Amino acid sequence: MLIKHRNPSAPLPSEITPKSVYLDRRSFLRTAAVAGAGVALGSLPKASWGTVAPDGKFDNLTESRFNTDEQQTPWETITTYNNFYEFGFGKEDPGLYARSLKTRPWSVEVGGLVAKPATFGIEDILKTFPQEERIYRLRCVEAWSMVIPWVGFPLADLLNRVEPTGAAKYVAFQTLYDPEQMPGQKTDALDWPYVEGLRLDEAMHPLTILGVGLYGELMPNQNGAPIRLVVPWKYGFKSIKSIVRITLTDAMPPTTWNDYIPREYGFYANVNPDVDHPRWSQSRERRIGEFLKRDTLPFNGYAEEVAGLYTGMDLKKWF
């Protein structure tokens, strides 16, 4: 389950394998199919995103106005302690087995209630979409509390390219479905592929981003390569990984955890200290690597930016 509090057995940053050692681990022994082949439709303008070096590092990154000055969670923690059930149910499984995922070529199909449906290749996304903000140091709840320096850009930049129609009210997302590459999908633990959704105004908010990297480098597979959603005022299960399809719709779309256990996981999933999970309190949290708990902040500390999206809503009912 994706939960608000860090598991007491979670490793401290000092206990986690260094990045240099982690990268030398043997890859998962499986022949992997090539995933998501596709090409961008149409000619997209070039932007000043910068280049991606052969070692996977971005150049010419700029700072987001949403950045926090809180201490960042170390790379070793972010990349070796994950929930990504497509690669296993242990926290270390994604870091060990997600290397089976082939992220090139990759494409994202965007359609539904839009005027200009399109399929965007990941290389075109990297070159054209990020126009302003590119590094987001955000508080996130990735089954625990972290501060992650994402590399990304507003989802609204992509949605504006396809021109949502007046009938569009929600945005649905889908993860890659490929059991040969994602062995967890061979189980019946969840109804695959993983799906998520946002209300359109949530999706268009500038704090809702598509992440393509972290710590100035391309997104590691275990963190949702090559492109994932990041919605920092919501619990982590909303931030769907390895996206291949985005569909605008007039009806609230199905979402994996809400369908599986609706009593425990609502559609909105806003971080709310006043709404407990049926099996634990969510009023306090422990940031990974810390001993003492801290008070959980409404909307994970982003209330000033996003609370207006929910004016008049009963957030205990619409949890």
Image (cartoon, helix red, strand yellow):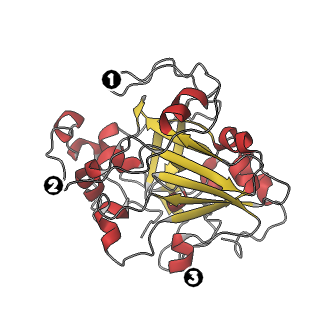
Residue at 48% x, 65% y is 194
Q: Residues within 10 Å of mark 3 (few under 14, many from 20)?
A: few
Q: Is residue 12 left or right of residue 103?
A: left
Q: Residue 85: image x %, image y %?
A: 36, 64
Q: Is residue 92 left or right of residue 131?
A: left
Q: Nearer the viewer, mark 3 or mark 1?
A: 1
Q: How many angstroms separate mark 3 from mark 1 (CA)?
A: 46 Å
Q: Amino acid at mark 1?
A: Pro
Q: How many marks?
A: 3
Residue at 61% x, 21% y is 47
Q: How many angstroms separate mark 2 from mark 1 (CA)?
A: 25 Å
Asked if residue 319 is positioned above or below residue 13 in the image, the reply reads: below
Q: Is residue 52 left or right of residue 46?
A: left
| Residue where numbered disc 1 is placed | 54
Q: Give the quadrant of the N terminus.
A: bottom left
Q: Which mark is residue 29?
A: 2
Q: Residue 286: image x %, image y %?
A: 43, 56
Front residue of this view, candidates 48 and 178:
178
